[in-house]
Image: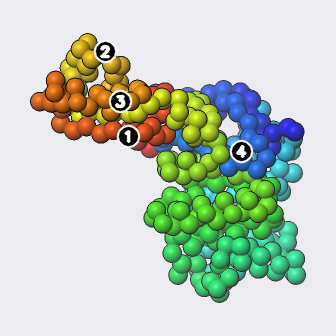
Amino acid sequence: MAPLLEVQNLSYQYGSRQALKSLTFSVEKGEIFGFLGPNGGGKTTTFKILSTLFSTQPGQVKLFGMDLALDRIAIRRRMGIVFQLPALDKKLKVSENLRHQGHLYGLHGAELDRHIARDLERLNLKDRAKDKVESLSGGLQRRVELAKALLNDPELMILDEPSTGLDPAARKDFWNHLEKLRQAQGMTVLVTTHYLEEADRCDRLLILDKGEKVALGKPEELKAQIGGEVLRLRAKDPMALAAQLQEKLKVRTQLVGDLIQIEQPKAYQLIAPLQEGFGDQILSLTLGLPTLEDVFIHKTGRRFTEDKE
């Protein structure tokens, strides 16, 4: 069976700035597929192309077997979109927002009423249907956004940073609803995020940096590539200590900002010799299993949060 989405050698340029560079990947039907990366990594540009807001430049995008450059209208009818910035009229009631969105999809009368009732029920919003959107919490408003995007029974849902601005509990709640929808109707989900805990919930991830593919795979497989444990040291003179560790302990070190990072199996065994031989130089020490940020550091040599918007 052909992938639901196929992207081949996709590039995009804003004036002289290269936002995407020869991006190639595919997404299978029913996947929750994530785009993870720092600000400026290329996530939003990818989102705008896949949601048909931007035209394809060099490269090809095929959705549902159709060419995005040639069949844009037909493709739009089969997808739902949740934007990063709110797209609700806060002065209208929840049901009124959904009704106006349904009209844009060409739904009317009893058919539209059924779709609204169904999606309010699916997202536990039935008792808030007559409330003005401005009276709802941020988490509830995002669920209304999701309900709007579901009205046309999309085969593909595309979400751009859907939980930005939500507290951790609301973020978890939103993702629980998204997972239930995927399981209930086999919907494929594409989501951009800079939250590592959200990326861990995806079936597969494409990690982007400066418009290029850094890594692609299942979150656990990507973390397994690090191999073992991650030891981080904060030191008085990181560069000098890193050189000493490589010379005397024969360990491979990596400078990440003001931290020394060591990745290896059974890294915990280094703690005692570090404290005995270099305790006066070490300010703090942390040990943990690899995270997706460690994957990013391993591939790029810098922390995920270093880049600014």
Task: Give the residue displayed 69% in from the left and 43% down from the top.
Answer: 49
- Percent of width and height locating residue 39: 48, 42
Crowding near pointer 2: few (<14 within 10 Å), some, many (20+)? Answer: few
Q: Which residue is mark 1?
A: 288
Q: Amino acid at mark 1?
A: Gly
Q: Estimate the spatial distance between the alpha carbons at disc 1 and disc 3, rounded to whole Å.
A: 9 Å
Residue at (80, 43) in percent of width and height = 4
Q: Which badge, 2 or 3, is on the more N-terminal residue?
A: 2
Q: Secondary structure at mark 2?
A: loop
Determine whether the residue tagged by mark 4 lies in a helix, strand or loop: helix
The residue identified by callout 3 is 267
Separation of residues labelled 1 and 4 (CA atoms): 36 Å
First in sequence: mark 1 vs mark 4? 4
- In the rendered structure, are the residues bearing label 2 and label 1 in contact, judged by CB atoms less than 8 Å apart? no
Residue 209 is labelled as none
Residue 241, given in percent of the width and then of the height, sits at 21, 22
Using the image as rendered, state which of residue 306 and residue 187 is in the foreground: 187
Return the mark for residue 50. 4
Instruction: Return the residue at label 2.
Output: 250
User: Do the residues under discs 1 and 3 have CB atoms within 8 angstroms?
Assistant: no
Q: Nearer the viewer, residue 260 or 208?
A: 260
User: Position of 268 compared to 265: left or right?
Assistant: left
Residue at 68% from the left image edge and 49% from the top image edge: 32
Q: What's the amino acid at mark 3?
A: Ala
How far across and how far down the image is residue 141, in percent? 58, 71
Query: To which quarter of the image does residue 179 belong?
Result: bottom right
Q: Earlier in the sequence, mark 4 or mark 3?
A: 4
